[in-house]
Image (tube, rainbow, N blue to C red):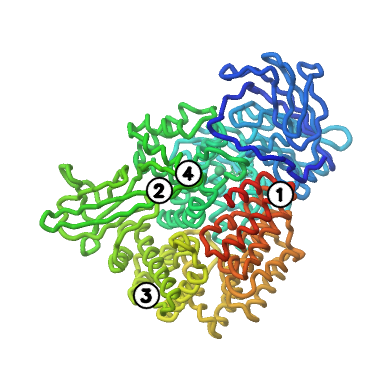
């Protein structure tokens, strides 16, 4: 049995329109899983009946299954006529209701795909979303088949002292031969993708939470022995999440125990299995010595995300995988709201938008562009995308904006009231929102159906005599693969008008009796909409897309003076930050054009002054200042260019940095000195802001690469009191290069060589260094003894960081970076197609580059597609990228 390679011949496209209800239902599943050192035996006993709602009445029951040995099949206690193919098992001529028992054998220790049942060192664990359960036993492995599970696990006690599965522990005991068992019962019907099993040598941190109705819940975080002291932050995050969901959505936890397990080898971030969340260990383990502020933040957000899935995903799940955003978009919105409530709402929103622009906008403009609710796929694992997650969250957020918080909450209540225990669709969600609020969402639903980022052009005209301000809004949506013609969307456009002193004006739209509020959400619905504001006493400056009220690309002919004015005065913090980004982007792009035309790149004083004012503004908190003085990233800038000019963008960005560094040198120095900090590490918004601002200043102070800069960076790195400071210092030193850079990298490795999660930072910093011969270094690091090509964290931190996080180096060198990536994709695809497919994405953007790079990138894609025995995962991305 070859379990290392997906040998599927001609990959089949699955279409949303082909959905039909399952012909059979499975009410209960009793699993017996026997774990051994070199195999696992699984016996599944299922109560099966015909689905009264099925459209067809087939004679046979056809189950999904993959990469297992079938041992036996019996129906109502007797041998059953059956036939197996590599991906199905057909049970012939079944009655209307029966008990089916199937025994299979698997080899978890050889499963490097990390889906189904596998081993992460000495720990057995499962990953069943999306289609992993079929690698454990034959099943109707689709989310609309919901069953009640009982799981009995047996194992040798010395090898696997801890035996876990979903639900409540109902029995445990000793067996002969040093073995023991545990029986878990999950009272809630669930789809197979939420099944989980974990067994191995684990320690746990235990705590309690009392729900608001008085249910006592035991909380446990399981980790490798020795890691328990690194679980406190995760536990605090869990308790905050549980409380927040009660306070904000009235949602309580529903089992007696909630368990989290940290696993070192995990393809994704984490997984919301009912009552037994499995996490990538990097999203659980933290202490100030080994984890950065960003790690602390991600842990809090992902613990919340997975916990929130208990209602949005588990209690109400997806009918089919095309509805993935039903649970993911909604749950991301909920974790974003949670993060906003835990710290600064403005920072949180800036973060959301940065991510969306860096990952989702390029996806929407590339060959894999797909709607939030896709219409087809070859491999569902390829659709856990920024579009489904981040844009999906924006879609739910827009509903929140259109309905307002109270009606949105009513919509959520109605959604749970109607659909608890069901597998439903994105339309069901929109219906609940519509029915609870009375707001018409008919046109709005296009956000689920149409791919691509809408372009919004906004122009304003002031008529002094009539005291009227007219805003003209044009929308357009470019074609995307499979969607040549688009309809106009319903776009909530949040706006304000500022007077000459920077104060918000009260807003009164034509036809309204009186002014209402200073921020208004305009309903943009047509190719062109015109909005007239009345009683406007003076020519205002418009604040547009406040709070980033819709995931669009905004174009507005605003002068540089207007943008600096907004940077200084807008009452909406997001819009304030955005004005700076727009101004920065505009001047960088102007400089790129100048460079191309052989002209000098000039940084206008106005921009330097605006940054100086931001640094001097005592009212702003430090995180916001750090955000505001950080220049737009290359991914965002690239999206604004008809053809991406990497060298040009990089040169211009460096020039702006250089000018800001020089002209504001005194400011950076005083910011650096003033934010030294003292006392033990605390993960609080103030302390995080302080550290961020200080490392931002350090980075500006290092731009000239001079002696003083090197000395300061070395001092910062050597005196670092926590991992946040170490990583910031190491990043700066790696970019400075030379003896200081090498020494710091060496010292860091020496100190942390026993900590894989910390070494990931070491790999990542080197892979992301925009200067020097990074590719050569990355190639050497692949052979480093600390590197492990089978561990997804290592692969993402080295290969992923280079290809996706270092555009300057990835696109340099006449295609050597492309060739390296393709080689890595092919090598990885032999054992882990999911990871291989994720690495591949950057090659798909070839259309955005010059002709030379296009040829080189396409050549690598073609080489990949031509490979024999390619997985469905990689085939889909590579072939669609070439289309
Ligand atoms: N549902 C999880 C993410 C996840 C998705 C797929 C996986 O394997 C293919 C694993 C995890 C979440 O949203 O957190
Ligand atoms: Zn999720």
Check disc 2: other Cα within 10 Å, few if <14, some if 14-19, many if 20+.
many
Circles 1 and 3, Cβ within 8 Å, touching? The answer is no
Determine the secondary structure under disc 2: loop
Label 4, label 1: how far apart the Cα atoms are: 27 Å
Label 1, label 3: how far apart the Cα atoms are: 48 Å
Q: Which residue is mark 3?
A: 608
Determine the secondary structure under disc 3: helix
Ligand 2 lies in which image quarter?
top right
Q: Which residue is mark 1?
A: 832
Residue 316 horizontal/vertical position (percent): 53, 32
Determine the secondary structure under disc 4: helix
Determine the secondary structure under disc 1: loop
Q: Which residue is mark 2?
A: 477
Upstream in sequence: badge 4 or badge 1: 4
Closer to the camera in the image, 756 or 481? 481
The label shown at residue 512 is: none
> Please, is residue 242 above or below residue 590 in the view?
above
Q: Which residue is mark 4?
A: 392
Label 3, label 4: how far apart the Cα atoms are: 37 Å
Upstream in sequence: badge 1 or badge 2: 2
Q: Nearer the viewer, mark 2 or mark 3?
A: 2
> Please, is residue 355 above or below residue 86 in the view?
below
Closer to the camera in the image, 671 or 837? 837
Label 2, label 3: how far apart the Cα atoms are: 35 Å
Check disc 1: other Cα within 10 Å, few if <14, some if 14-19, many if 20+.
many
């Amino acid at each position: 049995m070859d379990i290392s390679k997906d040998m599927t011949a001609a990959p089949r496209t699955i279409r949303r329109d082909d959905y039909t209800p399952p012909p059979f239902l499975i009410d209960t599943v009793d699993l017996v899983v026997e774990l051994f050192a070199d195999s696992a035996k699984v016996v599944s006993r299922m109560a099966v009946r015909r689905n009264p709602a099925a459209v067809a009445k087939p004679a046979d029951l056809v189950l999904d299954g993959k990469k297992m040995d079938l041992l036996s099949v019996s129906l109502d206690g007797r041998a059953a006529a059956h036939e197996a193919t590599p991906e199905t098992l057909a049970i012939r001529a079944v009655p209307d209701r029966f008990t089916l028992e199937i025994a299979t054998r698997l080899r978890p220790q050889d499963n490097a795909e990390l889906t189904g049942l596998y081993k992460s060192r000495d720990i057995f664990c499962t990953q069943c979303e999306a289609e992993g359960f079929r690698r454990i036993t034959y099943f109707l492995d689709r989310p609309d088949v919901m069953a009640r599970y009982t799981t009995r696990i047996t194992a040798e006690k010395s090898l696997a002292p801890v035996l876990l599965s979903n639900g409540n522990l109902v029995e445990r005991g000793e067996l002969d031969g040093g073995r023991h068992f545990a029986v878990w019962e999950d009272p809630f019907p669930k789809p197979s993708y939420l099944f989980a099993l974990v067994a191995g040598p684990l320690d746990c941190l235990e705590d309690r939470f009392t729900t608001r109705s008085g249910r006592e819940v035991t909380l446990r975080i399981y980790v490798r022995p020795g890691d328990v002291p690194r679980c406190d932050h995760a536990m605090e995050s869990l308790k905050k999440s549980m409380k927040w969901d009660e306070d904000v959505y009235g949602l309580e936890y529903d089992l007696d125990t909630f368990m989290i397990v940290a696993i070192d080898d995990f393809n994704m971030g984490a997984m919301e299995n009912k009552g037994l969340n499995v996490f990538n260990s990097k999203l659980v383990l933290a202490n100030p010595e080994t984890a950065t502020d960003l790690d602390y933040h991600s842990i809090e957000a992902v613990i919340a995300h997975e916990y929130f899935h208990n209602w949005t995903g588990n209690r109400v799940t997806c009918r089919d995988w095309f509805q993935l955003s039903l649970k993911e978009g909604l749950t991301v919105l909920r974790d974003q709201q949670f993060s906003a409530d835990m710290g600064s709402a403005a920072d949180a929103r800036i973060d959301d938008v940065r991510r969306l622009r860096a990952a989702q906008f390029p996806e929407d403009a590339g060959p894999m562009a797909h709607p939030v609710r896709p219409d087809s796929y070859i491999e569902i694992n390829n659709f856990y995308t920024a579009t489904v997650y981040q844009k999906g969250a924006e879609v739910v957020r827009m509903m929140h904006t259109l309905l307002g918080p109270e009606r949105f909450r009513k919509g959520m209540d109605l959604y749970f009231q109607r659909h608890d225990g069901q597998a439903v669709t994105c339309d069901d969600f929109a219906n609940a929102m519509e029915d609870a609020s009375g707001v018409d969402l008919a046109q709005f639903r296009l956000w689920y159906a149409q791919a691509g980022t809408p372009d919004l052009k906004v122009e304003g005209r002031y008529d002094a005599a009539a005291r009227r301000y007219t805003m003209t809004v044009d929308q357009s949506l470019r074609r995307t693969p499979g969607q040549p013609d688009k309809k106009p969307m319903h776009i909530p456009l949040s706006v304000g008008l500022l007077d000459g002193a920077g104060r918000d004006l009260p807003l009164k739209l034509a036809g309204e009796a009186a002014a209402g509020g200073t921020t208004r959400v305009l309903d943009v619905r047509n190719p062109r909409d015109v909005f007239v504001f009345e009683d406007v006493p003076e020519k205002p400056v418009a604040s547009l897309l406040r709070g980033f009220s819709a995931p669009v690309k905004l174009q507005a002919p605003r002068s540089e003076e207007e943008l600096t004015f907004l940077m200084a005065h807008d009452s909406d913090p997001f819009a304030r930050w955005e004005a700076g980004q727009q101004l920065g982007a505009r001047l960088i792009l102007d400089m790129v054009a100048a460079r191309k035309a052989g002209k000098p790149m000039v940084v206008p004083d106005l921009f330097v002054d605006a940054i100086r004012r931001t640094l001097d503004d005592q009212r702003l908190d430090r995180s916001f200042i750090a955000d505001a003085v950080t220049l737009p990233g290359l991914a965002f800038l690239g999206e604004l260019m008809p053809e991406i000019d990497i060298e040009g963008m990089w040169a211009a960005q460096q020039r702006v940095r250089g000018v800001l560094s020089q002209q504001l040198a005194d400011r950076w120095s005083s910011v650096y000195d003033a934010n030294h900090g003292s006392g033990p590490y605390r993960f609080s918004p103030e302390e995080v802001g302080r550290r961020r601002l200080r490392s931002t200043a350090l980075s500006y102070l290092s731009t000239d690469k001079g002696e003083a800069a090197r000395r300061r960076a070395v001092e910062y790195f050597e005196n670092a009191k926590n991992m946040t400071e170490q990583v910031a210092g190491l990043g700066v030193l790696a970019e400075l290069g030379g003896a200081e850079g090498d020494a710091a990298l060496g010292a860091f490795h020496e100190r942390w060589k026993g900590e894989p999660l910390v070494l990931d930072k070491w790999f990542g910093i080197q892979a992301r260094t925009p200067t020097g011969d990074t590719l050569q270094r990355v190639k050497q690091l692949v052979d480093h003894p600390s590197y492990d090509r089978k561990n997804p964290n290592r692969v993402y931190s080295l290969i992923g960081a280079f290809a996706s996080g270092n555009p300057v180096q990835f696109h340099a060198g006449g295609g050597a970076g492309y060739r390296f990536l393709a080689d890595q994709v092919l090598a990885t695809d032999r054992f882990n197609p999911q990871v291989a497919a994720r690495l591949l994405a950057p090659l798909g953007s070839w259309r955005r580059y010059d002709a030379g790079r296009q040829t080189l990138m396409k050549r690598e894609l073609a080489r990949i597609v031509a490979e024999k025995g390619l997985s469905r995962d990689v085939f889909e991305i590579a072939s669609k990228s070439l289309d």
